[in-house]
Structures are given as structure tokens and as C-alpha cells.
Amino acid sequence: MARPPTAAQRRVIEGADPDTGRLRGTDAQLAALVRLGLAFRHPRPPHDHFLTPAGHRLREAEPEPAAPLTPAPAPAGVFAARVGGAEEIPPGPSRIREVRDAWQGLLELRRMTNPDSATDRPCAWERTHLVRAAALALEAAGHEPEHTDTPGYRVRATPQPEAVAVYGPELRAYARTLEAAGWQCGEHTEARTKTRNVLASPRRV
């Protein structure tokens, strides 16, 4: 689990360009924000750094009052995709807004980082955060994740490069959603367990 950014890193985030999310800071600060998933380095020269959707959410979050340091499930304002399982993320109108905003932020990230500014296929950030990216696409389309005794989707990593497995009761619907979001999908049966799943990979073209 990523640790919260330091005060100095927060100042870099808060000083980001309000329109583009472009960051200014030392090489060490920018590299640290990339490791935290709050920034990314643009692949084209001059290789500036920009906020990720999580970074935008953290910058826009209301400051919290000072309080004793206690363990927290995630840094304040950082969006957490629901991958399915025992996740303590309450549903409701606020969650719907968060998912919508996160998905719009991801589309903007695609526009800014794909070489042709395409928004119909995954970007580099999604390829390094496969499970979270696929889960966001599913939740943004209205699918419900598995939780306790409630059936729903589960997104899990696989040994295959650039591939995730999606389990649940609506495999064809999950595949259609991911394909519309720019992923390549195919249904598979696991040899050992005979469990059906959708194997999904980010489309490159």
C-alpha cells in the first residue's frame, strides 16, 4: 500500500498547473510522486511530469483538520478502484461521482499521453496498473464488484504480461465493456480449476 505523500510532495502537487496538471519540482520529488502513482513522466520531449488521475484527486481534495496520526486505508483523496473482494468502499451517490470523475480523468490522461492523443485505447499508466485500470473501466460502466456474499466481478493479475483475469457471473458483459474501453478480451477456462474467466489485455492499436 502506497504511503501518503510528504508535506514537500504535497506542495509540489498543489502547485501543479490547474489546467494541464504539469508539475514543477526537483528530480527526486518528481520521481517519488511517480512511484506513488500520483504523477507520470511524459514519454515525449521535454519529458515533463504531470499529475495522474489520483494526483488530481489528491490536489482537489479538501484539506483535513489536523489530527493524531492513525493508520488509514489510503491517502486522503486518492481514488481506489474496486477490484472485487473484501473492500471497504461504501457505495452510494458520492462513490458514483468519484468513479465518474476518475474515469474522465483517465480519458484525459489517455489524450495527453497516447502518441496520437487517442482516448479509445489504454495509455502507458494503465499498462503498469492493469488490475486497477480494468476495474475502473468495469465500475465506470455500472458493473458491481464482488463483495462478501454478493456476486460480482473480480479482477486479478495473471502470470501473462499485460493481461488480467476477470471473474464473475456476467463474463460476456464484462468483455463487451472492456472491449469498448480499448481492451482485447477472450473467454478462457482454467485447466486446473475449470473456472471460466475473461482474459483482458490493453489494445495497442
Image: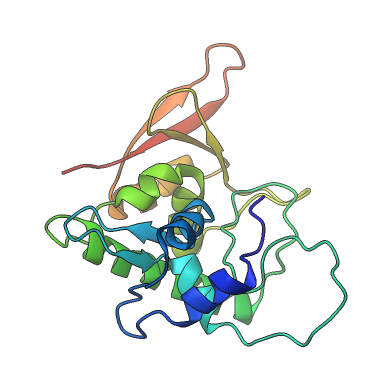
Please tell me in which quadrant of the rendered image residue 65 appears.
Answer: bottom right
Q: Which residue is outermost to the top?
A: 192
Nearest to the observer: residue 86 or residue 17: 17
Which residue occupies the foreground of this view, 172 or 38?
A: 38
Residue at 32%, 55% (x, y): give it.
181
Residue at screen point 53% across, 78% down: 11
- The quadrant in which residue 107 appears is bottom left
- Name the foreground residue: 127 vs 177: 127
Marks counted in the figure total: 0
Question: x, y (%) of residue 78?
Answer: 59, 68
Residue 81 placement, left or right of 149: left
Q: Is 37 situated above or below 201?
A: below
Q: In the figure, is residue 44 to the left or right of 20?
A: left
Along the line of sight, which residue is nearer the eye, 167 or 83? 83
Spot occupied by residue 103 in the image (x, y as percentages of width and height): 41, 67
Q: Quadrant of the C terminus?
A: top left
In which quadrant of the rendered view does residue 87 lie? bottom right
Q: Position of residue 30 (x, y in %)?
A: 43, 61
For the point 59% across and 49% down, which residue is it? 83
- Please state if 28 lies on the left or on the right of 92 as rendered: left
| Residue at the image position 48 percent from the left and 75 percent from the top | 13
Asked if residue 116 is positioned above or below residue 105 in the image, the reply reads above
Q: Is residue 167 above or below residue 79?
A: above
Q: Position of residue 21 (x, y in %)?
A: 35, 76
Most distant residue in the left direction: 116
Colour scheme of the rendered structure = rainbow
